[in-house]
Amino acid sequence: METLSLLELNALVRRSLEQCLPGEYWVQAELSDVRTNSTGHCYLEFIQKDSRSNSLVAKARGTIWANVYRLLKPYFEETTGQAFVSGIKVLVQVSVSFHELYGYSLTVQDIDPTYTLGDMARRRREILKQLEEEGVLTLNKELEMPDLPQRIAVISSPTAAGYGDFCHQLQNNPRGFFFYTELFPALMQGDRVEESVLAALDIILNRQNDFDAVVIIRGGGATSDLSGFDTYLLAAACAQFPLPIITGIGHERDDTVLDSVAHTRVKTPTAAAEYLIDCMDLAADGLEVLVSRLHESVLSRLTEEHRKLNLYRNRIPSAVVRRISDAKLTLLTARRDISQAVTSSLSHQRHRLELLKQRLTDASPEKMLARGYSITLKDGKVVKDAAFLNENDEILTRFYRGEVTSTINHKS
């Protein structure tokens, strides 16, 4: 029985593979564990998952030599707008090799970006379809943008050139509109885009009454970093956000999922600022139209009222003369009636006074004394009852003519 060493067996495998698979083959696979070493070589794994269970059904080690990777990576990322990272599906041209020490591997010679573009488009369609089925796809688009969107919550990297461009554009608008902006920092590239933007949205949500709209902007980054804006969780959060969301993440190719659910999508941060300024312009123009209409209405009303005043002024002379004549007659009649009434009242009151005077005269003490009556006084007070007098009291009796002083000797 022939025996082989492991090295001999592996060498036999290598020669067999080289004979059976001598050419290059286009292979569909998903990238996994992508890493680059200091020499520029890229090492990765190609995997395939079961479409139902999502479990691994195949795996192969892959290599992209530095001279190929240096050209292949930027070509792929510029074409797809997708970073060359784990988790994406690719169509690569590979040669099959086997090394006695390192084993089976696939060496990448070329890549077809259109396949990845198709897969990315499919994933976007699936996310958008899911949002539509959930009834939230167009919720943010249906929000009404305020007439004066002046209070803006900005989600961006504080060091991004696009953020500076956005603020400069707002602050230097031609008509001098005032805008208040507040930055909520977030990562705009890398594998933490989704997590970072969602965290910023949560903070804004807790202060939603402080803002009119949200702007998500990005500038200066590679187009390959756009994949972070193509996730279901971020799209669902933005679609259901209670404030209008404006996206300007700096690309002109196909919209990301985030662009598709946002209230308004523009190309760049500067365009986002221009959109807000245009909203203010529209509101200002509307106000100017209203002011013009109000001015015209006031002038028209003043003209009409002036015409009425002239008409009334022309009617006043004859009407006034007639009213004055009627008033004079009324006054003369009233004066005569008042004079007669006053004369009659004075005569009546004079007669009453005469009667009262006569009664007062008849009831005076002098008249009573003249009739033979007398008045008895004790200590200057009139005595009406003898019971109030005592023996030896001195009393004064006043007659019509004269008066006498007496001392009481006996009282019965």
Image (tube, rainbow, N blue to C red):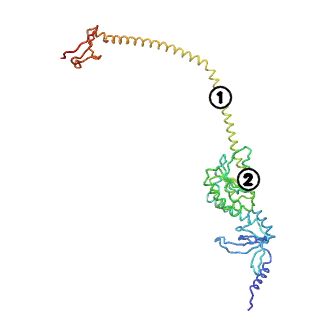
The crowding category of the residue bearing disc 1, from other C-alpha atoms within 10 Å (few below 14, some 14 to 19, many at least 20), is few
Q: Which quadrant is the N terminus positioned in?
A: bottom right
Q: Nearer the viewer, mark 1 or mark 2?
A: 2
| The quarter of the displayed image where residue 200 is located | bottom right
Residue 380 lies left or right of residue 326; in this view the side is left
Q: Amino acid at mark 2?
A: Gly
Give the distance between the C-alpha atoms of the residues marked 1 and 2, in whole angstroms: 56 Å
Neighbour class for label 2 at 10 Å: few (<14), some, many (≥20)?
some
Residue 53 placement (x, y as % from top left): 64, 71
Identify the mark at residue 42; answer none if there is no mark.
Answer: none
The tag earlier along the polypeptide, 1 or 2, is 2
User: Residue tagged by mark 2?
Assistant: 164
On screen, residue 331 above or below 233? above
Question: Where is the C terminus found, in terms of image quarters?
Answer: top left
Is the residue 1 above or below the residue 49 in the image?
Answer: below
According to the picture, the residue beneath numbered tag 1 turns out to be 304
Q: Give the percent coordinates (x, y) of residue 211.
A: 64, 50
Q: Amino acid at mark 1?
A: Glu
Could you tell me which secondary element the residue under label 1 belongs to? helix
The residue nearer to you, when weighing 40 against 328, is: 40
Position in image of residue 336 (x %, y %):
48, 12
In percent of width and height, residue 176 lies at 72, 44
Q: Nearer the viewer, residue 10 or 304?
A: 10
Q: Residue at x 64, y 56 (%)?
A: 201
